Amino acid sequence: MLNVALPKGRLGEKVYAMFEAAGYECPSIRENSRKLVFENEEKQVRYFWVKPSDVAIYVERGAADIGVAGKDILLEYEPAVYELLDLNIGKCRMAVAAPADFRDNENRTLRVATKFTSIAAAYYAGLGRQIDMIKLNGSIELAPILELSDVIVDIVETGTTLKENNLIVHQTILPISARLIANKASFQFKGPQIEDLLCRIKEQVNECD
Ligand code: PRP
């Protein structure tokens, strides 16, 4: 059995559709909304729904052989996994956002609110800019509104959340997309199975281009 960790939610639905089209279907996954594990014995595949930010942990520790995680999570936590393929879906960007009239005053420490403290730290270290990091777990856009921070470092997809909270992108840090990742030991022991899947998923990625 190949154990596959899928990110729960909209991205996961897209990822499963790709796996299905690649010949790794598991019809029961579309029937039940609360169950977390689904398998298709004939195709030798078992899927489980995982919180998107936890996929890399399941794969790193071998609870899943492969999985799909955002590049943001891979950069932030640097899990010891193989990154096999850019799936070209789940596209968004990591950006610095703030009110439109925000101007950075280099004489003051910049207050940065984010979930992605490693990415933010590396970005500002690269600029030689001193910051006061404020780690939040969600609703990051609230921080500049309440003057908890000067800027935020967060994911921007459609831009709707920023717009509705009167914020704009000031700098783009990097583009993000979903990546197929593999456990290092599984890649050795289930090599042919993973290679076969990789090859078929690649075809799907190219068809989506
Ligand atoms: C993410 C991100 C933004 C939003 C961006 O939040 O943190 O808030 O999506 O998307 P948009 O540009 O399409 O509006 P998520 O929904 O993951 O929840 P969170 O508040 O827990 O981070």
Image (cartoon, grey):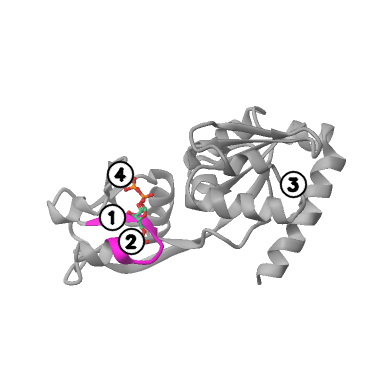
Q: CA distance from mark 3 to mark 2?
A: 39 Å
Pick whichever of labels 1 and 3 is earlier in the sequence: 3
The picture quadrant where one finds residue 108 is bottom left
Farthest right residue?
Answer: 192
Pick whichever of labels 4 and 1 is earlier in the sequence: 4
Q: CA distance from mark 2 to mark 1?
A: 6 Å
Q: Nearer the viewer, mark 1 or mark 3?
A: 3
Q: Secondary structure at mark 4?
A: loop
Q: Are marks 2 and 1 in contact (CB under 8 Å)?
A: yes
Q: Amino acid at mark 4?
A: Gly
Say which residue label 3 marks: 24
The picture quadrant where one finds residue 48 is top right
The magenta span reads 151-161
Q: CA distance from mark 2 to mark 4?
A: 15 Å
Q: CA distance from mark 1 to mark 3?
A: 40 Å
Q: Nearer the viewer, mark 4 or mark 1?
A: 4
Residue at image location 38% in from the left, 44% down from the top? 117
Pick whichever of labels 2 and 4 is earlier in the sequence: 2
From the Cβ of disc 4, is ligand 1 less than 8 Å away?
yes
